[in-house]
Amino acid sequence: MRDLLTSAVQMKAGPDRAANLSAAARAVHEARRAGAELVVLPEMFSWRGPPAEEANRAESIPGPTSRWACELSAREGVYLVAGSMLEKSSDPRRCFNTSILTGPGGNTMAVYRKIHLFDVDLPGRVTIRESRSRCAGDRVVCADTPLGRIGLAICYDLRFPELFRSLADHGAEIVAVPSAFTAPTGKAHWETLLRARAVENQCYLAAADQFGPTEYGFADYGHSMLVDPWGEVLAQAGNDHATVVTARFEAKRLDRVRSELPALQHRREFS
């Protein structure tokens, strides 16, 4: 990879797609004005509403949201991880939760479908059954770019170290983690998990989160974050407002961590 400024966008999306896309475009423009070359949007940035409506709101790729992302990347001259959107599947009742990476040439460079579905019941705090309305992906995705090799993950994937190790095995130097991490689980685990995945796999992480109360009876955690391969938090948002956080990802830092503590080379197979 080479040195670059990276931004994570924190926003609060709702059921008004046009308003969401307008807010996201303004944030990407702000990031670009600050010098960012890679910008990451949150999970479900383009539309967020009742789960029962998700399948009807899903789009094809290419489709309206993916074309919007390609056009925005070209206009701003950035590499854009377009958070995640609902993508049509072969099941009319369910859809994929899909992240795309677009480039300044206006092209789609990678498509990742969220592998791990958030089916969780924390009594009195949060109950979610993503599998009722969503399908799981089954493919690890990395993409070569002039900035470096970028891996893609989404929100709940963060709890599965084997996925991040597979991304490292695929050469990931930066991993984007668009999220809508709940406040109860985020307060307990968000920073810990991000820093652990960065340290374990000696890579940069760019985690863009939603924030604030939702119509589901819980709040999203916010605290969008950029983390380096040593586990140092380079930049972090709060939990109560839309913002853009930006930090420099340095190639020498990555190389130094991997050469001085070559843990990825010390792995052993065992049963």
Image (cartoon, rainbow, N blue to C red):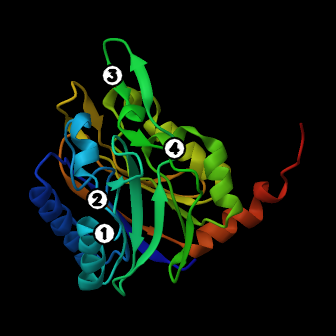
Which numbered disc, 3 or 2, marks the residue that appears first in the sequence?
Answer: 2
Q: Dot 4, how many residues are within 10 Å of its Cα: few (below 14), some (14-19), or many (20+)?
A: some
Q: Quadrant of the C terminus?
A: top right
- Name the residue beneath numbered marker 1: 66
- Name the residue beneath numbered marker 2: 59
Quadrant position of residue 201: bottom right
Q: Give amino acid for label 1.
A: Ser
User: In terms of depth relative to the viewer, which is nearer, 44 or 138?
Assistant: 138
Q: Dot 2, how many residues are within 10 Å of its Cα: few (below 14), some (14-19), or many (20+)?
A: some
Label 1 secondary element: helix
In the rendered image, residue 225, in percent from the top left (x then y), is placed at 39, 51
Q: CA distance from mark 1 to mark 3?
A: 31 Å
Q: CA distance from mark 1 to mark 4?
A: 22 Å
Q: At 55% from the left edge and 72% from the top edge, which residue is drawn?
A: 143
Which numbered disc, 4 or 3, marks the residue that appears first in the sequence?
Answer: 3
Q: At 34% from the left edge and 33% from the top edge, which residue is drawn?
A: 182
Quadrant position of residue 71: bottom left
Q: CA distance from mark 3 to mark 2?
A: 28 Å
In the rendered image, is residue 70 in sight?
yes
Which numbered disc, 2 or 1, marks the residue that appears first in the sequence?
Answer: 2
In the rendered image, residue 223, in percent from the top left (x then y), is placed at 33, 44
Q: Dot 1, how many residues are within 10 Å of its Cα: few (below 14), some (14-19), or many (20+)?
A: many
